[in-house]
């Protein structure tokens, strides 16, 4: 392919060499903005972050969530597709047999290490069951300890309405410790323990 | 009471009191205030909000608490010194610029004299030459900081700063020659009083900016270059030399550099006001006969402050408007354009004075 070269006309001459016309041209613009904003900031584009949140598109890849069937079960069938395709190998799934025969396979453990995740969205595309999505609209996750980024199955399946754009805020204390993750019970699927 | 007054009127004591008042009530507060205002005003220029988060309780005062926060932060920050730095020079370098910046105010009158009492620390005969001497001192701050830091980037920044400041000092002096000629004195109060005359009866005040328009432009350019602010901020190039001559500094010493920059900003503004905008003189005030002396003094202080503040604002506005010159462009502009221009200005002024006076 031939490269296209755009020739920019250089302006030379006394007017340019004087600098002053250009200087006052620039000053006119900056002073205009200054005066407009001096009395009550009118054109400010800043989003005052914690109080205001940026509106993100529904396709925006945010924190993962695990979708559920109408009966409350997780849609995930623990097929390992997402774990296999994940480029940063941050999904960890352990499959289990469900007591309810209609469910067959389900993830006993479904962990995502959000610190390793690169938010590429491949897991969403790989899933044959539409069981994992990234439409939560959570644009920032900031916690004070490392293990809180290891999102477990129960955290991921939190229902979330992307339309409302109200971020679910997790405190450290709300999040399970790594020990709790291994003890995730089938009960939390909404199925009575047998 | 009488005794106290007598002690106060001893010249040395009086000078110290004036120095205190000017430094503590005028130069330093305004300089500190400008560190915040630069950020606030630049935010307005760029349609941003600017600093507004520092608070005590719920009080943020539109960001005014940031001044306190900055001060506290730099006091408690570690004062580092790089390995192999020249200890003594490294430690004193930040204060050269600050002292030079503050010393400018020594000869600037902020209001007309009342009897024997002048609103000026000292009214020496070579007033402006004193200012030249002092501003050339401030180059030491940059040079010493650059050489003593034992850092190549700081050294480069220091070299650039010294080359730039020395070149621009040359025609800073030449640009003012015209002012000396027009008002026939180097005494600052003489120049200020000279600007209280009028052309065409009492139509146009003989302000420096009208008698020496080119001289004003040249002098202002030179002063902006002296303070190392945009568009002449080649001594600080983030992309090439990280931060310039003060790269290795931290904590309070770094703040001293910043404060020196803003105090010299105020110094430049008050110098411009004094030499080119009539100083404290309010034009056409003489038409108001038997005005009370105290009111006139207050009005003069207000006029001086308003003009000074305006030129502080103007310099900040300038910084956020123009892109910086490359270093070779700075040098070419100084030596090839502004120096000949200031010489021409000097000759033309001399010719006009000889021909018409
Ligand atoms: S978004 Fe990409 S990196 Fe993150 S879990 Fe899914 S596949 Fe892995
Ligand atoms: S989330 Fe989807 S791809 Fe991943 S294991 Fe479950 S069903 Fe398979």
Image: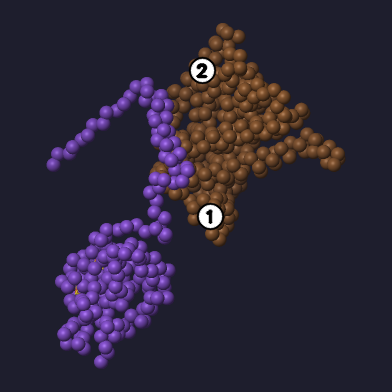
Q: Quadrant of residue B4?
A: top right
Quarter of the picture holding the C terminus of chain B? top right
Q: Which residue is mark 1?
A: B60
The chain ID associated with circle 1 is B
Q: Which residue is mark 2?
A: B345
Disc 2 is placed on an element classified as: helix
- Colour applied to chain A: purple
| B133 displayed left or right of B62 | right
If you read the primary sequence from the N terminus, does the residue marked by circle 2 or circle 1 appear first? 1
Look at the picture and state if B121 lies above or below B152: above
Which one is nearer the viewer's eye here, B349 or B326?
B349
Q: How is the image coloured?
A: by chain
Residue B165's label in the rendered image is none
Image quarter for ligand 2 equals: bottom left
Q: Is residue B73 visible?
A: no
For the point 53% across and 24% down, the residue is B216
For the point 18% across and 37% down, the residue is A4
Q: Which chain is brown?
A: B
């Amino acid at each position: 392919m031939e490269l296209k070269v755009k020739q920019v006309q250089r302006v030379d001459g006394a007017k340019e060499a004087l600098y002053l016309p250009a200087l006052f041209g620039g000053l006119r613009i900056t002073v205009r903005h200054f005066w407009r904003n001096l009395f009550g900031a009118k054109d400010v584009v800043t989003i005052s972050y914690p109080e205001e949140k940026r509106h993100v598109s529904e396709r925006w890849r945010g924190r993962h969530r695990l979708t559920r069937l109408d009966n409350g079960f997780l849609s995930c069938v623990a097929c390992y597709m997402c774990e296999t395709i994940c480029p940063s190998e941050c999904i960890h799934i352990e499959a289990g047999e469900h007591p309810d025969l209609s469910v067959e396979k389900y993830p006993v453990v479904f962990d995502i290490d959000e610190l390793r995740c690169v938010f590429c969205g491949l897991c969403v595309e790989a899933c044959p069951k539409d069981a994992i999505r990234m439409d939560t609209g959570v644009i920032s996750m900031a916690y004070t300890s490392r293990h809180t980024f290891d999102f477990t199955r129960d955290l991921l399946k939190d229902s979330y309405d992307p339309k409302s754009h109200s971020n679910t805020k997790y405190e450290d204390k709300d999040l399970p410790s790594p020990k709790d993750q291994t003890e995730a019970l089938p009960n939390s699927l909404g199925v009575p323990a047998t | 009471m009488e005794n106290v007054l007598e002690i106060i009127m001893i010249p040395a004591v009086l000078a110290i009191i004036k120095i205190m008042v000017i430094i503590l009530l005028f130069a330093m507060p305004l300089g500190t205030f400008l560190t915040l205002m630069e950020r606030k005003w630049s935010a307005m220029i760029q349609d941003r909000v600017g600093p507004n988060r520092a608070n005590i309780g719920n009080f943020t005062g539109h960001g005014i608490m940031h001044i306190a926060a900055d001060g506290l932060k730099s006091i408690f920050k570690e004062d580092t010194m790089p390995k192999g730095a020249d200890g003594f020079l490294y430690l004193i370098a930040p204060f050269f610029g600050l002292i030079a910046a503050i010393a400018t105010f020594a000869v600037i009158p902020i209001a007309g004299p009342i009897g024997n009492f002048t609103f000026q620390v000292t009214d020496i005969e070579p007033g402006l030459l004193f200012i030249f001497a002092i501003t050339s001192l401030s180059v030491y701050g940059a040079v010493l900081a650059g050489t003593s830091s034992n850092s190549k980037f700081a050294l480069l920044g220091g070299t650039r700063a010294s080359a730039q400041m020395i070149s621009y000092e040359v025609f800073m002096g030449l640009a003012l020659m015209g002012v000396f000629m027009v008002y026939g004195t180097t005494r600052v109060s003489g120049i200020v009083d000279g600007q209280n005359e009028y052309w065409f009866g009492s139509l146009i005040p003989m302000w420096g900016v009208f008698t020496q328009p080119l001289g004003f432009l040249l002098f202002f350019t030179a002063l902006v270059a002296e303070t190392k602010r945009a568009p002449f901020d080649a001594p600080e190039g983030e992309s090439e030399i990280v931060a310039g001559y003060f790269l290795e500094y931290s904590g309070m010493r770094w703040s001293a550099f910043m404060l020196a920059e803003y105090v010299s900003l105020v110094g430049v503004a008050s110098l411009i006001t004094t030499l080119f905008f009539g100083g404290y003189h309010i034009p056409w005030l003489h038409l108001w006969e038997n005005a009370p002396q105290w009111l006139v003094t207050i009005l003069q202080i207000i006029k001086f402050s308003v003009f000074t503040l305006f030129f502080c604002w103007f310099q900040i506005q300038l910084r956020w408007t123009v892109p910086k010159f490359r270093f070779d462009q700075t040098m070419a502009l100084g030596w090839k354009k502004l120096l000949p221009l200031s010489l021409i200005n000097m000759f033309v002024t001399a010719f006009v004075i000889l021909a018409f006076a």
